[in-house]
Image: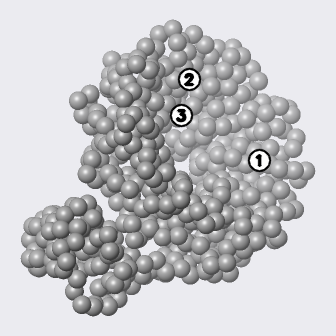
Amino acid sequence: MKRIFTSLIATAAPLFVMSQNVNINILKDINPGSEGSSISQLKTFGNKLYFSADDGIHENELWVTDGTSTGTRLVKDINPTGNSGIVELTEAGGKLVFSAFDGSTGIELWVTDGTEAGTKLLKDIYTGESSSVALNFKQYGNRAIFVANDGTHGEEVWITDGTEAGTYMIKDIAPGSESSYSSDFTEYKGKIYFQASNGIDGWELWTTDGTEAGTYMVKDIFAGSDSSPRRFKVFNDKLFFRADDENGDELWVTDGTEAGTVLVKDINPTEGSSINEFVEINGRLCFRATDGVHGAELWTTDGTEPGTVLVKDINPGGADSFPGALTVFNDKVYFQATDGVHSEELWVSDGTPNGTYMVKDINPNGYSAPNFFATFKDKLFFVAIDGSNGSELWMTDGSENGTVKLTPPNATEPSPLYFLPFFTEFNNELFFKAEFDDQGVELWKLSLGELNVTDVQKSLTIQVYPNPVQSELKVQTANKEIIDQLSIYGLDGKLIKTSHPKSNNPAINVSQLSKGTYLLEVQTSKGKTNKKFIKN
């Protein structure tokens, strides 16, 4: 089954139309009928894609594909009596390790090389029928860090190289049967940083190099309580994170030393700023925070106190815009937010107030809640609701007109992406979990064809000058209408620059563009039109 969609990047009497074929195919109807195969845990490894699926016979088990229907197969029925519950597929020692249940030894550590014979219990950490429940896997060089409970030491930090002998507890951080509940593993400067509790100092900042001696608390940030360091992000050769102390939860940074672990800024002096979702754009970190005045809004930092500032009060008056699902695409951050007029819609920011704006009001009658973003071939894919059929698959190039829904014309209920889609790029295609045509939830794949640029020039409604241009390109409409948006595209269809002049004779700086031919899209209240220009 194949669906081909065409995305139009320019409409409304265009001078040039850019179109691109979007090919969507079901990989394989693993569980025929309307039940679906409960796809999850997609992981690329070697030249294959591994995942968990239920074919209606074996329940949820380990599957593999080479990207073709005939090359999609069950690897092994790990639990012949039920669901193996595979989670956390992670590379270690040239193999994949994961947590699974075989029906007799509990939830334990497994390993696979992609063959049935090579898929086996790696180590029964909590011997017998009890479960060690190996979780929180993080690849660390050629090994994997995780947490597990051996029945004696509680839940502690373990490491594996994919062999039984090379699988061991690194350190009993909370001595005895107490658990350290370690989590948020992040690699920085060749070590793993995480939060853990030793049973005395509360949840604090720890680090490990994979050895017992090299596993220690970096700093007791909140003496006598829990700082709970989390949301780690490496930026400018330092590790930024959210942590609590007497100031509440705020922005912290560490260079890996106790002295170098410090508060960056007390954003909300009254109760904490609830920092979340770090992403890096244009040499700065963007994140969500509240300062107690503006509500939850978009912030940015260069790593210093004076350089930590509110980007824009998107929803004025102290209300929350609550920017969420922050994702970097083409050197900007895309996210969902509400400005108090429109519900949760698609927004973009380059880290400046003028460069922060709503891309498109996808659902004028409610919220579109764009989420689960994934970049693929100079496009951004996501899930959104336009009010017609629940959560659907969308694609954007960063412009309003280039934000389009990708749905077969006869898609059936329920909505195809009412659940986590598990977007994963593999073999030059984008794989995702979806439901189309009453086949239940299955694994689908998407590919993008070549971009086509068609010249359909009509009577000019805009003037651009000078053309060719070196620095500033000026724009004038025939009737001197207010120009709301200017967008520059390369002839490959990639959005390069956008501005919102709100003027009838604006100019846009093109001095940074390389020499060549570009397309300028001009948007007014009456629609859009386009004009080619040459940069000298």
Observer-nearest of 154 and 302: 302
Observer-nearest of 426 and 382: 382
Residue 38's disc is none
Pointer 1: residues within 10 angstroms few (<14), some, or many (20+)?
some
Counting residues from the N terminus, which is met first, the one under dot 1 or under dot 2?
Answer: 1
Q: Which residue is drawn at 79% across and 55% down?
A: 60
Observer-nearest of 197 and 519: 519
Q: Mark 1 points at which residue?
A: 85
Q: Are marks 1 and 2 in contact (CB under 8 Å)?
A: no
Q: Are marks 1 and 3 in contact (CB under 8 Å)?
A: no
Q: Mark 2 points at which residue?
A: 196
The answer to whether 80 appears left or right of 348 in the picture is right
The answer to whether 440 appears left or right of 113 in the picture is right
Tell me which amino acid carries mark 1. Answer: Gly
Tell me which amino acid carries mark 3. Answer: Asp
Observer-nearest of 460 and 124: 460
Counting residues from the N terminus, which is met first, the one under dot 1 or under dot 3?
Answer: 1
Pointer 2: residues within 10 angstroms few (<14), some, or many (20+)?
many
For label 3, the SS is strand
Counting residues from the N terminus, which is met first, the one under dot 2 or under dot 3?
Answer: 3
Mark pair 2, 3: CA separation: 9 Å
- The number of callouts visible is 3
> Can residue 429 be seen from the camera position used here?
no
Name which quarter of the figure residue 380 lies in.
bottom left
Q: x, y (%) of residue 397? A: 40, 67
The answer to whether 232 appears left or right of 308 in the picture is right
| Residue furthest to the right | 81
Q: x, y (%) of residue 243? A: 45, 24
Tell me which amino acid carries mark 2. Answer: Ala
Residue 184's disc is 3
Pointer 3: residues within 10 angstroms few (<14), some, or many (20+)?
some
Mark pair 1, 3: CA separation: 22 Å
